[in-house]
Image: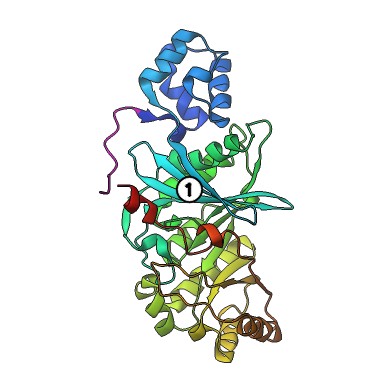
Amino acid sequence: MIILAPSLIMEQIYNLTKEELSESLKDLNLPKYRTNQIYDWLSSYASFSEMNNLPKELREELESRFSCTPIKIRNEFKSKDGTIKFLYELEDKNLIEGVLMQYKYGNTLCVSTQVGCRMGCSFCASGIDGLVRNLSAGEILGQVLCVNRHIGGNKENRKITNIVLMGSGEPLDNYDNVLKFIKLVSSADGINISQRNISLSTSGLADKIRKLTDENLGITLTISLHATTDESRKGSMKVANAYSLEELMDSIRYYYNKTHRRVVFEYIMLKENTTPSDALRLRALTRGIACHINLIPANPSPETKTKPITKEKETKFWQALKNEGLSATTRRTLGSDIEGACGQLKRRIIKEEF
């Protein structure tokens, strides 16, 4: 059984900026430092009962007004390479997944933006059951704060250094909540993760890419391209039926010309999209854009029909791109043994448990 989000009576406090929190508590006539204390506690993912420098009466008042801790870790799965996949439970009992990847430069958390996904890409297990609902800004933020605390961090000693919006869901299909999340997580009032350390991956909603461009954010835009012709792209990505490659590339050029920020193109390597002609078309598609091609080995999943190509063919395609003068690397696969790699996050565990 799939449980849908109820109409919550109490407001989720993690959806609020510090200014919004202050406004919502205006009737209590609190001194400014009290709001600062509350927000500091929230940034360390504390419950109201843990806010021990607040008067008991204030803690009780907060509990009567707001819902707290929008997400909790229900289970975790550790890979032999150190990657950790988290199964999160939301307040309405829906479940989502996320992945913590450990690198020499710090810890990167892959967060989800929706329960399920309606994009229906053939190589991705996240959209098998379609879209259940969008996550709120506070639920997306909760993933970061919850894991940060879980691995020993707090606001002052942050353990999460980078965020990739690459979990289940299409971020630009949940535009307003994702935008607010980016502003919340990068706020100096909160956990203060630089926007330069945040990557947003989209399957290519061209109109939303243009809208995002005009927000003047400092994030990295990552495009799930995965094909070099409209026909091929339509065969694996439903979004291609709404936006042609020409429309998509026009929106990306708009982004690049306005922001001057390098664009990353994600490209899953399959038998049908790694020909010499694909290498030529990739060069033509990306001409005039400072970009990097992130080649992704296909990760098998029981829910998809994705079949990996050989390492030899992967190397041959990479070399073809290099010969065309393109910047390209093959992404190191992390967490595949716990189904935490690209395209493997899904709701299968949910179906098993409910």
Judge whether residue 119 is colored magenta: no
The residue sitting at 43% across, 78% down in the picture is 233
Q: Position of residue 99 (x, y in %)?
A: 54, 51
Q: Taking 2 as reference, is 256 left or right?
A: right
- Could you tell me how many numbered marks the image carries? 1
Where in the figure is residue 77, as x and y percent of width and height? 53, 49
Question: Can residue 144 be seen from the camera position used here?
Answer: yes
Image position, residue 290 (x, y; %) = 66, 71
Residue shown at the point (27%, 44%) measured from the top left: 4
Q: Badge 1, how many Cα within 10 Å: few under 14, some, many 20+?
A: some
Q: Nearer the viewer, residue 135 or 256?
A: 135
**Majority secondary structure in the magenta region:** loop
Residue highlighted by disc 1: 179
Furthest residue in direction right, as rendered: 104
- Image: 65 above or below 238: above
Residue at 43% x, 60% y is 208
Quadrant of residue 27 within the rendered picture:
top left
Q: Foreground residue, 344 or 25?
A: 344
Q: Is residue 26 above or below residue 228?
A: above
> Would residue 57 appear left or right of 255 to someone viewing this image?
left
Q: Residue at x 58, y 26 (%)?
A: 40
Way the structure is coloured: rainbow
Q: Nearer the viewer, residue 1 or 107?
A: 1
Range of residues picked out in magenta: 1-10
Q: Is residue 111 visible?
A: no
Badge 1 element = helix
Q: Which amino acid lies under the numbered mark 1 shown in the image of this protein? A: Leu
For residue 244, above or below residue 1: below
